[in-house]
Every structure is written in C-alpha cells, then in structure tokens.
C-alpha cells in the first residue's frame, strides 16, 4: 500500500513519442542552421542565436525535465546559467566578437602585417580550403612549418595545390608564393625590384643569362663560386650561395616568380625542373 | 509532488531501497548534480566568453575559415543531438524499470546507454580527427589567438564528452549488470542523463558561436 502510494507520486513518465518528436524537431532546426555552413542560403546572426537559444531551452526543459521536475532544480540552475549567458553576451558586445564582418578586419590586419613585416615573416602557409596565404610565424611551432628562412622539412599544402591546379592557377600560385620566398631569401642582395646593385647582378631582364628552367634552377640550387659571368653587359665573379636547403616546390615558386616579375616573361619552373637541376649539378658557362 | 505524499503520511521513509531525499523532498544526488551543472555553466561561460572576445583578432593565420571542415562539424553536431534523444530514452526506461520493481536486468536502459556512448565516442573521434587536421593546417595552441582559445574551449568540451562516454560505459557495463545500483537506480541514470544533456547544450552554443558565425554573411 505504502509502495503504491509512493509510486503514484513518482515522476510522470512521458510517452516515448514525445521524446522522438522533440528529437525530430531539434534535428530539423539544426538542419536549417546548416544552410549558411554550406552556403545554401544566409541566416541573420540574430536568428541563428535565437534558434540556438530555442534548442538550448527545449533540451533543458524536456530532455533534462526542468519543465515538470521539482522547481528547486530550476532555481539552482537557471540563475547561474543566465549569469553565464549574460557574461558571454557582455564580452561579445564589449569586444565586438559577435560581428561577423570583423573577420574582414582581421584580414586587413593581416594585409598590413604582410606589407610591414613581410621580410620578418619566415613562414608562409596556404590554406587548402580557402587558398589564402597567411603568415604562420614567428610564434608558430617552427619545427613543423614551412620555413622559408631556414628551409623546413615540410611543404604542407602548397605541393598538393600546385600539382592539382590548371596552368594559369599553377602560375598564379607559384608566383604568389615565390614572392614570399623571394623577399625572404633573395631580396636582400638582388633587391625587391630585381635590379641588384654592387656585387649583385640584376634579375630583371636577365633571361638571356639564366636561360631555360633547368639551367636557371642549376644556378640557384648549386650556387656560383667565383665563376666569371656576364649579366646584362656587366661582369661579375662573386659568390651566389647554394639554395639547396629549399624544397623543389619552394625553388620552383621563387624561380617562377623571378621569371614573371619586373617585365620578365620567361615561363614557369616546375618542381620536376628543380629535381632535374639537382641531379645535373652546378651550372657552368 | 513528493511534498504532498510526505504531508499525507502514507510514504514509508524507511523503505529499504528508497533513494535519499533532502528536506526539500528531492533527491540529494540530483540536487547536488544540478548545482554542479550550474557551476559548469560558468566554466564554459568563461571559455566561450574568452573565445568570443578574441574572435577575429588573431594577427597571424590560420583563421577559422581556413581550417573548419563543415562536413565533419555537421555530422558531429547531429550525432551529439541524437545521442541526447537516446539518453533521454535510457532515462525513461530506467524510470519504468524502477517503477515496475522488476528484478531483471534493465537491458533497455543499457541498450540506450550503449547507443548514446557510441555516438559520443564517434563525436570524440571526429574531434581527434579535426584537431589533427587543424594542426597540420598550421593551427597550434600557441600559434595565434584563434588557436589558443579554440583548442581550449573545444578541448574542454571534448573532454566532457569523453568523460560522459566513460561514465555511460562504466555504468551500463559494470554498475548496472553487477547490480551496484539498486534503490536510487532511476536517479543515478537520470544524473548521467543530466550530464550528457548538459554537454549537448554546451555544444549547441559552441556550434552556433564558434562555427556558424564564421559562415554568415
């Protein structure tokens, strides 16, 4: 008798169909939320936040049973939950974290970073999803990253990207990345404008000297050790340091950059050309 | 309400398998657990607030759009949501089992818990895959603000899910079969459910603020 009396006051057990119905509703709302994720359609931020709040409320009320459980649980949980939500909202408002356009601003910051510190950025990476370049130094884990300054062990995504691209894309990718390699590795002597100066030959208009892709790669990969050369009518016999610590793709990129900058139109260099140059040995006149 | 039953004096307070109740007429265990969840709100509130404060302020890449995999995130989100459904069905089965006073092993409860644990384990697996992928894209804990705040927030959430999976497995494979949970059976499963649903609602917030906001125009 007493057990029965107790059972009558046990929590009411809902029909399983109610839970399944709620589950289906939650799945539908989540399905609608996926629209912006896959770029099917756009949903304003405020609506997304509202949809998220509805899902949150439904799970708490019906799956966690606050709707029909003892009120003391709600009194224990709701104030801290609201407090935490207000804290997040306040931080978002104070620091502009809610504004979806501020991602654009961070790209602008990145652009400035490039312009101002491009020579200091020793590590450039390219996202395989957005195809965007970003500076991954100096704070980033140096050992794992592509290091233009020191010649890292990994190329990362660029080799995949370049190999898969069509010719114009390949050229654009190689020159774009090659520019970074150039400013980190070559610009100190040959200058950003490719005009060289003093003991350093110009690269702008020097196509007649450096010649074919493999020839060009042989000069850069193995360097020149007091070999007498004549570039654009000027005699040199200095030291061009070997760049053999760079990968084939890095070298292909920087050579392609040189061959397509400052008015040069000498065709792109592919990683295979660099590999060929490595086997062929140092360039000789 | 239980308070009515207490007032009527028909309830045997010394019944052998009766769960411990506070003077409020509710289970000690559940009340304590709701207080813990309330504190966990602030735990995740601080992590989400920190993430949102630093959002879009990384000086160096990679940025969220460079690394996020929408397919993986969508599957994870659906799995965790549906695991909440299987969990609530486990809690429901536990209540039915307790009220029927059956001595048999509550296999329905265990089954729903296994389904929940399986989906939770897949969620954790996807997160391991995701972290690994992000790391190879150049996103590290120390590399930029996005990396630091993202890994801390989602890492702690993933840890919560992993603990939930272990809890579900230990409860359904050891405690219940060994009959270590008896009188307060429904409450014990209920509390496991509360934890699991809490982890799910935290993900509802993270999914919206961390992932969806990157893709609205």
Image (spheres, coloured by chain):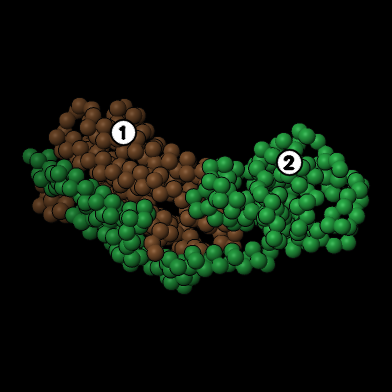
Which of the chains is brown?
A: B
User: Which hue is chain A drawn in?
Assistant: green
Q: Is residue A178 above or below residue B13?
A: below
User: Gap between marks 1 and 2, in whole Å?
Assistant: 62 Å
Q: Mark 1 highlights which residue?
A: B114
Query: Which residue lies at the image location 21% right of the left edge and 47% below the top edge?
Result: A24
Residue B10 appears in view: yes
Callout 1: chain: B
Circle number at residue A103: none
Query: Which residue lies at the image location 34% right of the left edge and 38% below the top edge?
Result: B119
Q: Where does residue A20 sit, x and y in percent of width and height?
A: 19, 44
- Observer-nearest of A183 and A163: A163
Quadrant of the image occupied by residue B42:
bottom left
Q: Where does residue B104 sit, x and y in percent of width and height?
A: 20, 26
Q: Mark 2 highlights which residue?
A: A214
Query: Which residue lies at the image location 26% right of the left edge and 49% below the top edge?
Result: A27
Image mark count: 2
């Amino acid at each position: 008798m007493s057990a029965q009396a107790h059972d009558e006051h046990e929590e009411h057990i809902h029909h399983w169909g109610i839970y399944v119905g709620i589950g289906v509703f939650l799945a539908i709302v989540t399905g609608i939320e996926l629209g912006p994720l896959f770029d099917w359609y756009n949903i304003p931020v405020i609506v997304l936040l509202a949809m998220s709040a509805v899902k949150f409320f439904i799970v708490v009320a019906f799956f966690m049973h606050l709707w029909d459980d003892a009120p003391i649980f709600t009194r224990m949980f709701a104030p801290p939950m609201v407090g935490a939500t207000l804290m997040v909202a306040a931080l978002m408002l104070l620091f502009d974290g809610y504004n979806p356009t501020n991602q654009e601003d961070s790209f602008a910051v990145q652009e400035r970073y490039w312009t101002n510190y491009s020579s200091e950025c020793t590590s450039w990476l390219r996202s395989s999803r957005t195809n965007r370049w970003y500076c991954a130094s100096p704070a980033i884990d140096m050992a794992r990253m592509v290091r233009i300054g020191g010649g890292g062990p990994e190329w990362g995504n660029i080799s995949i990207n370049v190999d898969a691209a069509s010719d114009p894309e390949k050229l654009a990718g190689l020159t774009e990345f090659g520019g970074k390699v150039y400013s980190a590795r070559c610009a100190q002597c040959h200058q950003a404008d490719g005009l060289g100066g003093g003991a350093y030959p110009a690269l702008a208009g020097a196509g007649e000297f450096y010649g074919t892709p493999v020839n060009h790669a042989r000069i850069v990969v193995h360097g020149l050790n007091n070999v007498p050369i004549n570039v654009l009518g000027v005699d040199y016999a200095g030291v061009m340091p070997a760049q053999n610590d760079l990968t084939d793709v890095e070298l292909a990129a920087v050579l392609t950059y040189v061959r397509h900058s400052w008015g040069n139109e000498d065709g792109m260099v592919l990683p295979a050309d660099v590999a060929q140059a490595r086997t062929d040995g140092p360039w000789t006149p | 309400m239980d308070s009515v039953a207490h007032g009527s004096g028909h309830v045997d307070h010394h019944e052998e398998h009766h769960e411990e109740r506070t003077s409020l007429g509710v289970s000690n265990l559940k009340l304590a657990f709701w207080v813990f969840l309330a504190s966990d709100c602030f735990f995740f509130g601080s992590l989400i607030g920190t993430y949102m404060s630093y959002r879009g302020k990384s000086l160096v890449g990679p940025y969220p759009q460079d690394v996020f995999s929408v397919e993986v995130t969508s599957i994870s989100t659906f799995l965790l949501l549906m695991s909440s459904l299987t969990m609530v069905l486990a809690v429901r089965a536990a209540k039915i089992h307790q009220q029927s006073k059956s001595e048999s092993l509550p296999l329905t409860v265990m089954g729903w818990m296994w389904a929940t644990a399986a989906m939770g384990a897949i969620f954790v697996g996807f997160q391991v895959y995701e972290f690994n992928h992000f790391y190879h894209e150049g996103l590290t804990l120390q590399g930029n603000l996005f990396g630091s705040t993202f890994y801390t927030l989602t890492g702690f959430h993933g840890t919560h899910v992993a603990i939930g999976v272990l809890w579900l497995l230990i409860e359904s494979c050891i405690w219940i079969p060994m009959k270590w949970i008896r009188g307060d059976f429904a409450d014990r499963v209920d509390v496991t459910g509360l934890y699991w649903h809490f982890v799910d609602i935290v993900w509802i917030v993270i999914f919206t603020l961390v992932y969806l906001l990157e893709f609205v125009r």
